[in-house]
Amino acid sequence: MKKILIMVLFLFTGIFVTAQDREAHREKIRALKTAYITDGLNLTTEEAQQFWPVYNEYEEKRRALYRQERAEIENLECISEDKANLKLEEYVELEREDYLLKKKYYNDLKNIFSARRIMQLKKVEDEFNHKMMREYRARKNE
């Protein structure tokens, strides 16, 4: 009994450490992204104070939509046509929410930046994402 308890303890410790490592990794990427965007846009202190709350709120809501969309689907072999239709309608609704969120985000940004600067932000974000993917692929191939 004591051995089983110790094994279970090690198992949970391993899972907990892995979860902590994953969260620490996400935080590191967020910090890198923040620095990359701040540098790429050459944000002033005043601009950063206005921009980051808007950006962080948008990112948080996008992540929530992403998690909803990627939620586990029941076994497709056993799902009824009605449930499948409901799931498809849910996907369409999530896409609509994503569109409305993005529209609000860009309108909110117009209170901080010019349209050209918002386009620059989009470019800097895309560059960061491409850079991260290149680094991920390079590390995966090592």
Image: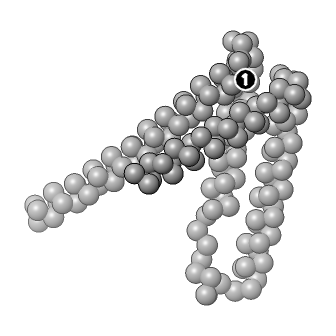
Image height of 26 relative to 49, above or below: below
Q: Which structural element holds mark 1? A: helix
Residue 91: % across, % down: 76, 65
Q: How crowded is mark 1: few (under 14 residues within 10 Å), some or many (20 or more)?
A: some
Does 22 sit left or right of 60 as displayed? left
**Amino acid at circle 1:** Leu
Residue 62: % across, % down: 70, 46
| Along the viewing direction, whichever of 72 and 2 lies nearer the viewer | 72
Please give the name of the residue rendered at 79% of the width and 58% of the height, measured from the top-left corner: 95
Q: Residue furthest toward the top?
A: 45
Q: Is residue 57 visible?
A: no
In which quadrant of the rendered image does the N terminus lie?
bottom left
Protein image colouring: one colour
Does 105 sit left or right of 27 as displayed? right
Image height of 60 relative to 36, above or below: below
Residue 63: % across, % down: 65, 48
Residue 106: % across, % down: 84, 36
Does 105 sit left or right of 9 as displayed? right
Please give the name of the residue rendered at 44% of the width and 48% of the height, measured from the top-left corner: 139
Q: Residue furthest toward the left?
A: 2
Q: Which of the 4 image quadrants contains residue 58?
A: top right
Does 23 sit left or right of 79 as displayed? left
Q: Which residue position is annotated with label 1?
A: 41
Q: Can residue 16 be seen in this view?
A: yes
Please give the name of the residue rendered at 81% of the width and 61% of the height, measured from the top-left corner: 93
Number of numbered discs on residues: 1
Q: Which of the 4 image quadrants contains residue 34?
A: top right
